[in-house]
Each structure stands twice: as structure tokens, then as C-alpha cells.
Image (spheres, rainbow, N blue to C red):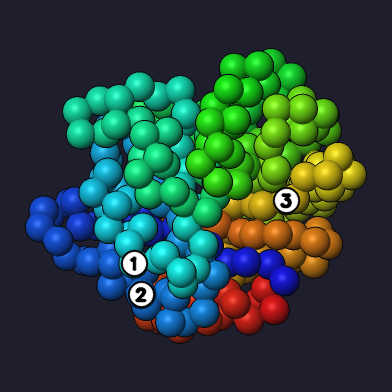
């Protein structure tokens, strides 16, 4: 069974655009849980463009004992202002999963994964530190990645396939090549003993095809499309529709 983790970043973007506390991240998380999601994802950034450190803490209290908590972020980004760094946040809230992503302030959104051969040694002490906290560690990778021995060697337990190019190819009607790259990456990761997550630009339109192509898909993290669709159909209804696709 593939777990649906709902990314709440866009709820925070809307709240921050006006100031104050509405729309409420806590209420959105509660609605998603009641509708059947298995996890909540947030991606705190040093520039605090959406999720803030206090959001991470509030959600940790709300989710504990109910669903998985997936904290995304760049482990190399240093503390800045109220942002204490990803490891420090994890030490406070002990999320179920840490998804390490090589993003920076200049990126509008995460748009590439780690080069595991090049980056493994830098990641190794951080992976060990997160695992010491009891967090499952997932590494964000590009479709087409096939060398996973470095990830296994440093103690990663999962990878998350960056599915942006797949989604764009699906929308253009020429999906076969990009889907094949995702399938091969998933197959090679599973052969190495890693579980496979996926995320970025997945939607109700393209999720079913992706899920059917990758047996054993452990988790999908979906935010932008899901929140956009919820504007028309409601958050609970939209989450239930995603669960139906995955089931």
C-alpha cells in the first residue's frame, strides 16, 4: 500500500501572503488526516518563504501518534534568524522521516536531486545524525539515477524520485521515456535494498499511471497539485480521491 503524504507548503504560502494565522496549517492537517492521508509533509527553508520553524513544532504535536511526519530540507543550509537548521529542528520534533533535498534560496521549488556518487561523503555524517534521532532517511534523486551503493553505504533507507520531468512529459502526451527512467531508477533502488518514494508535480491526472508502473511504491508526497485541486473540490474530497487512486 502506498502512503499518501500531503505537503502543506502551499497552505503556508497563502497564510503568509496576508499575515496572521489563516488559513490554519493545523486545521488543514487535521482535515487531511480525517480524509485518510497517511502522512503530512512540510519543507522548512531558511528564508521561511512558507513553512516556519514554529509550524514544524505545532504540527509535530498534532501529528504525533496519528500519521507519519515527513520533514524535507537541505541539511547543509546553515541557521538563519529563527531558522535553526534542519538537524536542530529534527532534534526538537523527531519526525518519522527526513527527506534530504539539495535546494537553495534561488530555487523557486526543488528541481533536482543529489548526485549520490559525488555527494555521499558529505551526506554521511548527517544521515548518521538523523538516524540517531530515530528518523528514517530518504534522499531526493533524479529519475535516471542507477548507482545506489553510495546511498546504502552511508545508511540511507529510502530515495525519493523527483517526478517533475515525468509530470511535464505526461502533460505533453509524450510520457514513455520519462516514465521508463523513473521505473528503472525505482527498480535499481529496490534491488539495492532501498524503499522508493516519489514526489513533485504528481496530480490526479498522472498519479495512476505512475503508481501502476512502479510496484512497491512506498510513498508519494503531493502538495502543489493537491492544494490547487482542493480550491475547486474541497480539501477532504481531494485527499479522498488521491487515496482512491493509490488504493
Look at the numbered discs 2 and 3 and tell me whether their residues touch, using CB distance below 8 Å: no
Tell which tag, 2 or 1, sits nearer the viewer: 1
Residue 27 point in image, percent of width and height:
28, 72
Query: Observer-nearest residue: 60 or 179?
Result: 60
Looking at the image, is 78 positioned above or below residue 218?
Answer: above
Apparent side of residue 73 relative to residue 144 in the rendered image (left or right): left
| Mark number, residue 196 | 3
Tell me where residue 23 appears, x and y as whole percent: 21, 66
Q: Residue shown at 58%/39% (left/top)?
A: 131
- Tag 2 and tag 1, C-beta contact below 8 Å: yes
Q: Secondary structure at mark 2?
A: helix
Residue on which the image places disc 2: 30
Above/below status of 93 relative to 227: above
Q: Earlier in the sequence, mark 2 or mark 3?
A: 2
Q: Residue furthest right?
A: 191
Is 122 positioned to the left or the right of 158 in the image? Answer: left
Q: How many marks?
A: 3
Q: Dot 3 surroundings within 10 Å: few (below 14), some, or many (20 or more)?
A: many
Side of 128 where 106 appears, left or right: left
Residue at 65%, 52% (x, y): give it.
198
- Give the image quarter of residue 151: top right
Residue on which the image places disc 1: 62
Mark sitting earlier along the chain (3/1) = 1
Q: Position of residue 180 (x, y in %)?
A: 84, 48
Going 59% across and 52% down the picture, which residue do you hit? Answer: 199
Label 3 vs label 1, nearer the camera:
1
Q: Which mark is residue 91?
A: none
Q: Quadrant of residue 235?
A: bottom left
Distance from the alpha carbon under mark 2 to that under mark 1: 8 Å
- Of labels 2 and 1, earlier in sequence is 2
- Tell me the quarter of the image containing the N terminus: bottom right
Tell me the SS state at disc 1: helix
Amino acid at each position: 500500500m502506498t502512503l499518501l503524504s500531503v505537503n502543506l507548503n502551499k497552505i503556508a504560502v497563502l497564510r503568509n501572503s496576508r499575515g496572521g494565522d489563516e488559513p490554519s496549517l493545523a486545521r488543514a492537517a487535521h482535515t487531511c488526516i480525517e480524509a485518510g492521508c497517511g502522512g503530512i509533509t512540510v519543507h522548512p527553508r531558511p528564508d521561511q518563504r512558507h513553512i516556519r520553524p514554529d509550524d514544524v513544532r505545532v504540527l509535530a504535536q498534532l501529528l504525533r501518534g496519528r500519521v507519519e511526519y515527513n520533514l524535507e530540507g537541505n541539511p547543509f543550509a546553515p541557521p538563519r534568524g529563527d531558522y535553526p537548521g534542519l538537524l536542530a529542528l529534527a532534534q526538537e520534533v523527531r519526525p518519522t522521516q527526513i527527506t534530504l533535498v539539495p535546494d537553495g534560496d534561488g530555487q523557486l521549488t526543488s528541481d533536482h536531486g543529489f548526485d549520490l556518487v559525488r555527494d555521499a561523503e558529505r551526506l554521511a555524517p548527517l544521515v548518521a545524525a538523523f538516524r540517531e534521532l530515530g528518523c528514517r532517511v530518504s534522499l531526493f534523486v533524479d529519475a535516471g539515477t542507477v548507482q545506489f551503493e553510495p546511498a546504502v553505504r552511508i545508511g540511507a533507507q529510502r530515495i525519493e524520485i523527483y517526478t517533475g520531468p515525468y509530470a511535464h512529459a505526461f502533460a505533453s502526451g509524450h510520457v514513455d521515456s520519462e516514465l521508463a527512467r523513473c521505473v528503472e531508477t525505482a527498480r535499481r533502488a529496490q534491488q539495492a535494498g532501498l524503499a522508493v518514494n516519489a514526489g513533485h508535480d504528481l496530480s490526479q491526472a498522472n498519479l495512476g499511471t505512475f503508481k501502476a508502473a512502479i510496484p512497491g511504491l512506498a510513498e508519494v508526497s503531493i502538495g502543489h497539485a493537491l492544494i490547487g485541486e482542493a480550491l475547486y473540490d474541497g480539501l477532504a474530497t481531494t485527499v479522498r480521491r488521491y487515496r482512491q487512486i493509490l488504493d
